[in-house]
Amino acid sequence: MVDGAAAPAGARPSAETSGRCRIAAVVVSCEHASRAVPDEYRPLFAAAADGILDSHRAYDAGAAEVAAALAERVGAPLFTGEATRLLVDLNRSIGHPRLFSELTRALPAAERTRIVERHYRPYRDAVERAVADAARRGAVLHVSAHSFTPVLDGVERRADVALLFDPRRRTEASLAIGWRDALRQALPAGAVVRRNYPYRGVADGFTTQLRKRFPDGVYLGFELEVNQRHVGTAQWPAYVRALAASLARVVQGSSMRDAAAPPR
């Protein structure tokens, strides 16, 4: 495990310098929940490749189900994207080359701005407000639910579930260990749980941007990635319940550790 740096100045007193903290609230989001195309943009997709809206390029299959189960299990607010990422990618920062897809990138600047104002900013602002409100009560865990295709560019992804986080932030690094262990206990025997795979937790994304606003110990940002090979199988409902149970165990465990910590 990569050692993390000390928490930045200004972290709330509920954060412990050891990397442990009591989770006061959870916020769940799913940026790539939908493959829907708003009616006004359907002509743009008329000439798109067959099946593109059913592919991983359009949305994260199964992620919306996972997000809903997580939120319900721990009583967290849930935010889900309502349009395909091929219109605008809610998990990318403004200015990122993949904010728009090849289907929308060539639109006039004014139209791209209109898409951002109608479909991007309202979603991002709503999640950020929820995180900020929760952070006033203590440490907030933001879980962004995603899924990944089993094979990309001919390379097999050798994981069933993965956690993406910033290993330099001590509270995230500490929680990642506990959540990994909880996932291994909850999921079927032999399930492979990895950290910062198949992507880096510090790459451009919504959680990465929110870390710039909220310090370690106040904000814990995780992307929960699930292999799409499980989606739609007979075992999928049980898999989703296991993911939700692992989160509940982590949240409850953080409170128990905090309660058991000696007074300062």
Image: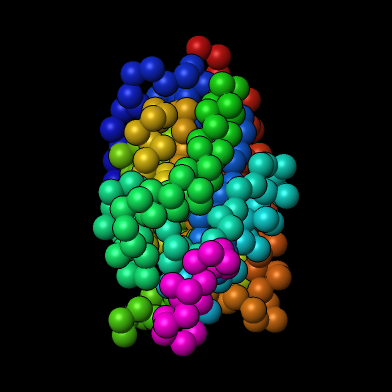
Residue located at (61% from left, 61% from top): 64
At 42% from the left and 81% from the top, the residue drawn is 48
Left/right of residue 175 with respect to residue 67 in the rendered view: left
* Residue at 72% in and 42% down: 75
Query: In this picture, is 188 found above or below 5?
Result: below
Instruction: Tell me if residue 59 is in the magenta stretch.
Output: no
| Residue drawn at point x = 43 percent, y = 66 percent | 86
- For the residue pair 179 and 215, the one nearer the viewer reads as 215
Q: Is residue 39 visible?
A: yes
Q: Position of residue 33 (x, y in %)?
A: 57, 61
- Residue farthest to the top? 264
Does residue 10 lie above or below 203 as drawn? above
Q: Of residues 181 and 110, which is closer to you in this image?
A: 110
User: Compared to 153, does 69 lie above or below?
Assistant: above
Determine the image quadrant of residue 126. Answer: top right
x, y percent for residue 172 = 43, 40
